[in-house]
Image (cartoon, helix red, strand yellow):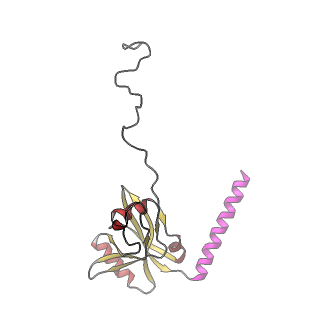
Amino acid sequence: MSPYGIGSPSPGWHLNSGFMAGKKPKSPEPEINNRKARHDYAITDTLECGIILYGTEVKSIRAGRMSLGEGYVRATEVPLSLELHGVRIDEYAPAGASSQHRPTQTRTLLAHKREIRKLARASQQKGVTIVPLKAYFKNGRVKILIGLGTGKRSYDKRQDIKKRDAQREVQRAMSKRM
């Protein structure tokens, strides 16, 4: 029996215990993938970079209004920079016309100096390019996963498609079996 009466809760007990007051459940934040890059390039090395954005750009990405398909990254040693080109971030509709951003502007990526130098030297080789692979949120900040890729030949692409189809058939056969 409780000293506070029959069946009464202890003094520290609250109706909504386990939930923090004022906190909303987080909605899943989008992860924008560049499937075309994985299809067209053999990715050898990847790097997670930060990106410099304005408020309406972040809100637009959070709404999933970003396209990485036509994007590429240019790394230069002099001056030392890593820039994202050709990526489209749509305008954020609820914002007014005066506070909008340009959808296809060049954006600066953030990485350590030694990593930028390494990418700049690697991208100078023939047939090597740097492509954006994925955009996602990490601790409330937008991160871009970039990859160092070499172009695939058309027969390599066909072989990848055949492997994918074979794996899909095996998965279907296994699911029917159970």
Give the quadrant of residue 51.
bottom left
Residue 168 appearing in the image? yes
Q: Is residue 28 left or right of residue 163?
A: left
Query: Which range is magenta?
Result: 153-178
Q: Nearer the viewer, residue 80 or 142?
A: 142
Q: Report the residue that reaches farthest toward the left.
A: 79
Residue positioned 43% across, 80% down in the render:
129
Residue positioned 58% across, 79% down in the render:
156
Residue 23 picture location, percent across and down: 38, 42
Secondary structure mostly seen in the magenta stretch: helix
From the viewer's perspective, is residue 98 above or below residue 23? Answer: below
Residue 172 picture location, percent across and down: 69, 59
Residue 53 appearing in the image? no
Looking at the rendered image, the quarter that the N terminus falls into is: top left
From the viewer's perspective, is residue 72 above or below residue 93? Answer: below
Residue 31 picture location, percent across and down: 47, 61
Q: Nearer the viewer, residue 15 or 145?
A: 15
